[in-house]
Image (tube, rainbow, N blue to C red):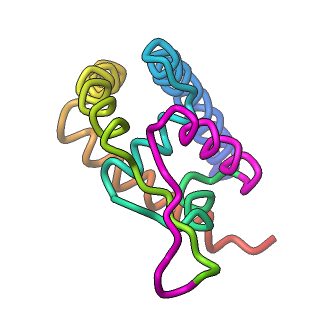
Amino acid sequence: MDNRELSLKLFVVLSKAYKVAMDHAVKDMKKRGLSASEFTVLELLYHKGKIPLQRLGEKLLVTSGSITYTIDKLEQKGYLKRVASPEDRRVTYAEITAAGTELFDQLFPPHSEVIESIMQGLTVEEKQIAITLIKKIGFSAQEYKP
């Protein structure tokens, strides 16, 4: 196989692997009572703390309209709150609430076990190599100028 054929094959294999893994992960999120977008927003806030609403979309690679809808739903459920920035009135933060933290304390450990099971086909060393190589693909793709 030449370089172009290998690139195409890698793209297809990577895409299929991502889809299968994400299908399992999303199914687990839904089983736990949250949509994939709700789960990922809560996970980000749980691990990183409050984040400006404008940056949530960038971090999760979704549109601002989609983020607003998800934030509204999570706020209605009492899992997060909007907090105005004291320094800049144009900035509003999303912050996980005590109820959201309590929920995620329960949801995340079994969900991380599901993710570990999905990735069981690789050894620890292979996972480290895969992380390095996939990051390299991502950085290279970011630099691509059509």
Q: Is residue 70 magenta?
A: yes
Q: Position of residue 55 (x, y in %)?
A: 56, 66
Q: Quadrant of residue 113?
A: top left
In the picture, the quarter occupied by the C terminus is bottom right
Seen at 48% across and 87% down, the residue is 87
> Is 91 above or below relative to 73?
below
> Is 58 above or below relative to 124?
below
In the picture, the quarter occupied by the N terminus is top right
Instruction: Decide which of 58, 49 is in the foreground and name it.
Output: 49
Give the side of residue 119 with respect to residue 12, left or right.
left
Q: Position of residue 9 (x, y in %)?
A: 63, 37
Q: Is residue 84 magenta?
A: yes
Residue reaching furthest top? 31
Q: Position of residue 57 (x, y in %)?
A: 62, 57
Give the side of residue 127 with respect to residue 61, left or right.
left
Seen at 56% across and 52% down, the residue is 60
Seen at 54% across and 38% down, the residue is 74
> Is 126 above or below relative to 93?
above
Residue reaching furthest bottom? 87
Q: Position of residue 53 (x, y in %)?
A: 58, 62
Q: Which residues are magenta?
A: 63-88
